[in-house]
Image: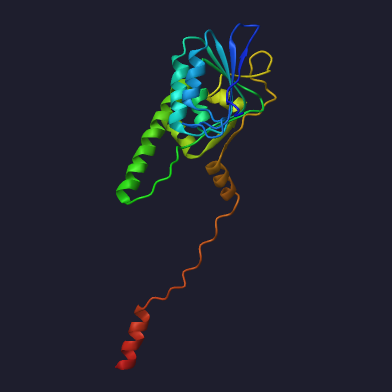
Amino acid sequence: MKRKFWNWVRNEDTGGRILVLNGQISDETWYGDEVTPGLFRDELSSCEGDITVWINSPGGDVFAAAQIYNMLMEYPGNVDVRIDGLAASAASVIAMAGNKISMSPVAMMMIHNPMTVAMGDQKVMQQAMDMLGEIKESIINAYELKTGQSRTKISHMMDAETWFNAKKAVELGFADDILYADGSGKPEETDAMLYSKTLVLNSFLGKFDKPEPEPDTRVSVEPLKERLFLLRH
């Protein structure tokens, strides 16, 4: 029997429901454990009241994620998003639909530029590049709406493929608080961490001294021309 990606659980304390969203996001299912908009819509439409969505996903299809994001944004009840492991790539877009986003102190979030596979001539490749640019702008819309960060800053973080832990996510506005923390949800013991390939590469290269410029060993031809002239005359 194929395993569904969701798991609705009745919360006896609040009367709401808990949805465990665990797996890759796809526009169709192959193994029964993918997160698909069609199956998600069927489950969400049968639910009433507030819901809690637990996310642990590496991401996947950006268009499928956009559909799920819209469904949660349109949901009439309160949507409490909780990230217990990973909300990366397209899964981070879905997370932005929460009225409140909470992260486990050991969870991670990652944002990056959209990617695709294209094959063809120059015109086809340019069309693919233009499409990716528009998709990136649409993703930035969701991040900007939630975080309040500037589009330029978000764009640079996506360019660098940026990872951040719970505290950094709260600082940047990608999350509202940290689970299991007393009081403010921002424990001082948890260090903020932001990682990107670009920052690591630049930091690594900065540890090396710049090479000394090589001495100029070139010889001017003018003196040689003068000597040749004297020999000939």
Q: Please report the residue visible at 65 percent of the width from the left and 6 percent of the height from the top.
A: 13
Q: In this view, does 129 lie to the left or right of 216?
A: left
- Location of residue 183 with respect to 167 vertically, above or below: above
Residue 17 in percent (x, y) is at: 59, 12
Quadrant of the frame with the C terminus: bottom left
User: Who is closer to the viewer here, 52 or 5?
Assistant: 5
Colour pattern:
rainbow
Q: Can residue 84 be seen in this view?
A: yes
Q: Is residue 149 visible?
A: no
The image quadrant that residue 186 belongs to is top right
Residue 184 in percent (x, y) is at: 63, 14
Q: Please report the residue visible at 51 percent of the width from the left and 62 percent of the height from the top.
A: 213
Residue 48 in percent (x, y) is at: 52, 8
User: Who is closer to the viewer here, 164 or 62?
Assistant: 62
- Location of residue 151 with respect to 41 vertically, above or below: below
Residue 74 in percent (x, y) is at: 44, 15
> Which residue is most to the front?
1
Q: In this view, does 230 lie to the left or right of 155?
A: left
The image quadrant that residue 7 belongs to is top right
Q: Is residue 130 left or right of residue 68?
A: left
Quadrant of the frame with the N terminus: top right
The image quadrant that residue 200 belongs to is top right
Count of numbered circles in the view:
0
Q: Please report the residue visible at 39 percent of the width from the left and 29 percent of the height from the top.
A: 138
Q: Please report the residue visible at 50 percent of the width from the left and 16 percent of the height from the top.
A: 44
Q: In this view, does 59 lie to the left or right of 182?
A: left
